[in-house]
Image (cartoon, rainbow, N blue to C red):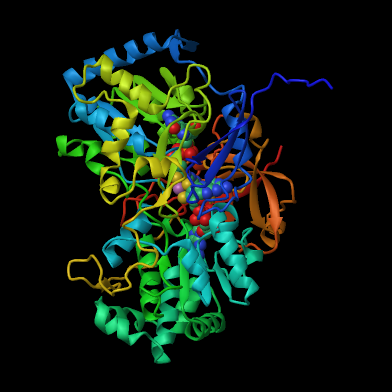
């Protein structure tokens, strides 16, 4: 018998985790053959995703190996981005930084996007702090309003562990689209439904999550506070409020009740455009099925007065007896930087430095005095993802020198004077925590960096060495230990995390069980101030909802994966009235810009809004943010994207 030896190495299986901007932060296994990742699957040992992954996961492998990925440094020469050596690119950037840092550090802006928020990325901001009082951003384009509002109520926002929702007798998904954004919630929803436990969705749009739920309420966008207050009033009137909790563990009860009783059910039903009978039915469900878990999404954050909505729902949770109870809670997210020592950012070195509002970046850049002369952007695509893109783009175009660290020549990459090719998580050793759960995950390198790409960590260490930054240039493992110090002190080791991950030791799975809150007087703060939804530019017919699409994640879309034209979902009767047929190309416009989109008629959609997916690139004609207004939320310095209105017109040739 002859034995044939195949010249093939055995596959390797590497435990890692997805670092994409997503609340699931799935634990993954990369299968590697001949130093090539051939598949990414869910880690079956993970307590969060238990072997599951979303449909985008195989796409991350394709993305890493995509022919359009930039794998070499580029420098703009005579107007064109041209391949360069690392040495030349580093030398050029270091000399520019050094020049501006000496004359006025304020003229340097660092913008860190949400593309990847791993432990080692804390050293990025430290680099800019070591240069002096450089300019950074403040505020956020993601969950600022929610965190700000919940911090007001709880002292510090902590959510229930996802698995605890299995103990609920009623789940209310409020402004969240788990079928798209929350893979880890799906088995819980299915489990509850299999036990005939109601799962109610509150969303003005009929999303992919609707069919998972027992019932959907479709309020007028931005008016959920009226709904939450109406529900609380019904519960108080029935004498079914959780008096034990309200009297012992809350403050502002008198002021809150005044707000609750200041309007009738009918007034509030009209304001949120939900029939009073439906509000009564939901109130009954809440009273009869305890504990209730309220699970909030990020759609609720995108309004100027989001905090009123979020705080009204927190307070409703208190009235319903959900706070501090297993199976209860008003859960919204986690602090993804919880495991780290935040002092590593080094902000205390420059307490009075200039900060530009991220959500208002375009106008902030144009107003900046002294002006920004060098903008350094990593892991973000502000031209496509910030509101009022046209303003952001023209403001960035005026900045004389721009450095971009990323993977593709997207809208922001194309503006760069120097492009540094970043690695993907498949090529990195790091650690990542999550804003959707409290499990710390390892990022173990599956393959060597492709081409000449380098991690952001290696990029900043190289620049630090060029600029002779003392005590900054250290090996990766040393920095990891410094950054992870608070967690390591609690007994976790880097090795335990490397082997598959661990829960953060200081985060309880059911928070606030003792009825004590980290607020100044230890009590849960009930809403004591009320403001109606902000008035938006009502002269346009439709509210514009630019939500997370199933097919892609933020602006991480390969160029060839872009649709020819973005879809716009519009109510069918309204479309008929406007003479628009299904599939027809229409013009969506307002005072900020215009976009061509393809009409998708939907009889289930409210007549007062249209939906366009977010994330597409501008130069491919797919950027919804040419139509969104740059507005801050009142609390949390978030972005009120959905306070934007548009008209939709037939295109006549
Ligand atoms: N596939 C995919 N997954 C993603 C993302 C993606 O782009 N694609 N993005 C990731 C990111 S960065 C985030 S932050 C999360 C977001 O995750 P989600 O919060 O689940 O998603 P969103 O689409 O932002 O908003 C959820 C829902 O809120 C609704 N909503 C908006 N305004 C209101 C309102 O006033 N009242 C009510 N009741 N509902 C409202 C919207 O109609 C929307 O269906 O998802 C992450 N996951
Ligand atoms: N209209 C509208 N716009 C929105 C929203 C909305 O609801 N409506 N929601 C917003 C939300 S929730 C968010 S979070 C933001 C997200 O907006 P951004 O912060 O701009 O994030 P991404 O679009 O994910 O862009 C991430 C970029 O980082 C790159 N990247 C990934 N990992 C790394 C890395 O390790 N190093 C480097 N250097 N680069 C890396 C990717 O290739 C990609 O180009 O957009 C917001 N924009
Ligand atoms: Mo986000």
x, y percent for residue 347: 20, 38
Indicate whether 427 appears above or below 151. above
The residue that appears at 52% across and 28% down in the rendered structure is 410
Q: Position of residue 215 (x, y in %)?
A: 61, 73
Q: Position of residue 515 (x, y in %)?
A: 28, 75
Q: Is 199 displayed left or right of 134 in the figure?
A: right
Q: Residue at x 62, y 76 (%)?
A: 195
Q: Work out whether residue 155 or residue 146 is closer to the camera in this orientation and state it.
A: 155
Judge by depth and name the residue closer to the eye, 65 or 311.
65
Say whether residue 117 is visible. Answer: no
Question: Which is more toward the observer, 498 or 337?
Answer: 498
Q: Is residue 173 left or right of residue 161?
A: right
Image position of 41 with respect to 269: above or below: above
Look at the image and tell me in which quarter the C terminus lies.
Answer: top right
Q: Residue at point 26% right, 43% down?
A: 485
Q: Is residue 622 above or below residue 634?
A: above
Residue 550, placed above or below residue 58 = below
Q: Residue furthest front?
A: 1
Where is residue 236 shown, x and y percent of the image?
A: 38, 87
Question: Residue sitting at 40 percent across and 46 percent down?
Answer: 433
Task: Confirm whether residue 37 shows in the render.
Answer: yes
Quarter holding the N terminus is top right
How many numbered marks have been drawn onto this rendered protein structure?
Answer: 0
């Amino acid at each position: 018998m002859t034995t044939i030896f195949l010249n093939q190495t055995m596959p390797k299986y590497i435990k890692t985790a997805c670092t994409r901007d997503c609340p699931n932060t799935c634990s993954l296994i990369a299968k590697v053959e001949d130093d090539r990742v051939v598949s990414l699957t869910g880690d079956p040992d993970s307590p969060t995703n238990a072997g599951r992954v979303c449909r985008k996961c195989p796409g991350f492998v394709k993305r890493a190996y995509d022919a359009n990925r930039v794998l070499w440094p580029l420098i703009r020469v005579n107007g064109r981005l041209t391949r360069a050596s690392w040495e030349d690119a580093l030398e050029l950037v270091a000399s520019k930084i050094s020049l501006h840092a000496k004359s006025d550090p304020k003229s340097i802006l660092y913008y860190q996007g949400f593309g990847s928020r791993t432990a080692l990325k804390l050293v990025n901001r430290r680099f800019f702090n070591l240069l002096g009082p450089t300019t950074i951003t403040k505020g956020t384009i993601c969950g600022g309003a929610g965190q700000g509002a919940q911090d007001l109520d709880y002292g510090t926002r902590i959510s229930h562990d996802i698995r605890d929702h299995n103990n609920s007798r009623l789940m209310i998904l409020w402004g969240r689209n788990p079928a798209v954004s929350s893979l880890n919630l799906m088995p819980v929803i299915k489990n509850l439904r299999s036990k005939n436990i109601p799962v109610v969705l509150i969303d003005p749009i009929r999303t992919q999550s609707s069919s998972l739920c027992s019932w959907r309420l479709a309020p007028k966008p931005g008016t959920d506070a009226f709904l939450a207050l109406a529900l609380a009033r019904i519960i108080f009137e029935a004498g079914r409020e959780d008096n034990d909790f309200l009297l012992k563990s809350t403050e502002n009860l008198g002021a809150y009740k005044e707000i609750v009783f200041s309007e009738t059910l009918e007034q509030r039903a009209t304001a949120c455009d939900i029939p009073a009978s439906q509000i009564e039915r939901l109130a009954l469900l809440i009273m009869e099925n305890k504990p209730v878990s309220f699970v909030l999404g990020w759609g609720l954050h995108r309004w100027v007065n989001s905090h009123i909505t979020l705080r009204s729902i927190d307070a409703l949770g208190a009235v319903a007896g959900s706070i501090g109870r297993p199976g209860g809670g008003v859960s919204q997210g986690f602090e993804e930087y919880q495991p780290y020592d935040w002092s590593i950012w080094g902000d205390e070195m420059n307490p009075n430095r200039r900060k530009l509002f991220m959500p208002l970046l375009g106008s902030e850049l144009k107003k900046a005095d002294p002006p920004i002369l060098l903008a350094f952007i990593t892991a973000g695509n502000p031209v496509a993802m910030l509101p009022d893109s046209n303003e952001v783009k023209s403001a960035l175009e005026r900045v004389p020198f721009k450095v971009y660290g990323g993977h593709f020549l997207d809208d922001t990459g194309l503006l760069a004077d120097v492009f540094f090719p970043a690695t993907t998580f498949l090529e990195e050793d790091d650690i990542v925590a999550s804003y959707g759960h409290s499990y710390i995950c390892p990022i173990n390198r599956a393959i060597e960096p492709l081409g000449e790409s380098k991690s952001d960590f290696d990029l900043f260490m190289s620049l630090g060495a060029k600029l002779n930054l003392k005590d900054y240039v250290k090996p990766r493992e040393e920095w990891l230990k410094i950054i992870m110090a608070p967690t390591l002190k609690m007994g976790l080791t880097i090795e335990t995390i490397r082997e598959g991950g661990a829960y953060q030791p200081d985060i309880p799975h059911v928070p606030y069980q003792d009825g004590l809150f980290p607020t100044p007087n230890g009590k849960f703060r009930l809403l004591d101030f009320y403001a109606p939804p902000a008035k938006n530019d009502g002269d346009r017919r439709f509210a514009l909802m630019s939500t997370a699409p199933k097919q892609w994640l933020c602006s991480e879309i390969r160029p060839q994966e872009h649709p020819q034209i973005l879809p716009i979902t519009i109510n069918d009767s309204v479309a008929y009235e406007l003479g628009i047929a299904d599939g027809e190309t229409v013009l969506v416009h307002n005072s900020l810009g215009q976009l061509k989109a393809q009409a998708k008629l939907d009889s289930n959609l409210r007549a007062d809004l249209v939906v366009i997916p977010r994330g597409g690139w501008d130069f491919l004609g797919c950027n919804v943010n040419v139509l969104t207004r740059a507005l801050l939320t009142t609390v949390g310095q978030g972005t009120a994207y959905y306070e934007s209105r548009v008209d939709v017109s037939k295109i006549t040739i």
